[in-house]
Image (spheres, grey):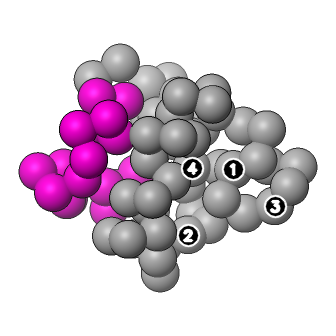
Amino acid sequence: MRRAILALPFLFLTTPAAFAQGTPEQRAACQDDAYKFCPYDVPDAEKVEACLRKYIRSISAACRAQFGK
């Protein structure tokens, strides 16, 4: 369940309909990092999550904080 919740912020990266997924805070915190560190994993939410975890020390503090929730 936690994995699904963490994946929600990245679902917005694919289509306008999917853009509604995740909170505005999550989108604002992680969108740039997802495109910077994981462009080839977008739009697969699970791959983006795994990628961002791989780069957890390099992603922004705001995005990193979303993984602690």
| Span colored in magenta | 48-67
**Quadrant location of the C terminus?**
top left
Residue 29 locus on image (x, y percent)? 44, 40
Query: Which residue corresponds to the image point at 51% horizontal and 34% vertical from the top-left?
Result: 26
The amino acid sitting under disc 3 is: Thr
Q: Secondary structure at mark 1?
A: loop
Mark 4, residue position: 10
Q: Is residue 2 left or right of residue 58?
A: right
> What is the residue that sits farthest to the left in this orientation?
57
Is residue 68 one of those drawn in magenta? no
- Dot placed on the residue nearer the N-terminal end, 4 or 2: 4
- Asked if residue 5 shows in the view, the reply is yes
Viewer-closest of 58 and 1 = 58
Q: Residues within 10 Å of mark 3 (few under 14, many from 20)?
A: few
State yes or no: discs 4 and 2 in contact (Cβ < 8 Å): yes
The amino acid sitting under disc 2 is: Val
Say the numbered circle drawn on residue 15. 3
The amino acid sitting under disc 1 is: Phe
State yes or no: discs 1 and 4 in contact (Cβ < 8 Å): yes
Residue 34 locus on image (x, y percent)? 44, 61
Q: Residues within 10 Å of mark 1 (few under 14, many from 20)?
A: many
Q: CA gap, disc 2 to disc 3?
A: 11 Å
Mark 1, residue position: 12
Q: Residues within 10 Å of mark 4 (few under 14, many from 20)?
A: many
Which secondary structure is most common in the magenta stretch? helix
Residue 65 locus on image (x, y percent)? 28, 28
Q: CA gap, disc 1 to disc 4?
A: 5 Å
Q: CA gap, disc 4 to disc 2?
A: 8 Å
Q: Secondary structure at mark 3?
A: loop
Mark 2, residue position: 42
Residue 18 locus on image (x, y percent)? 79, 49
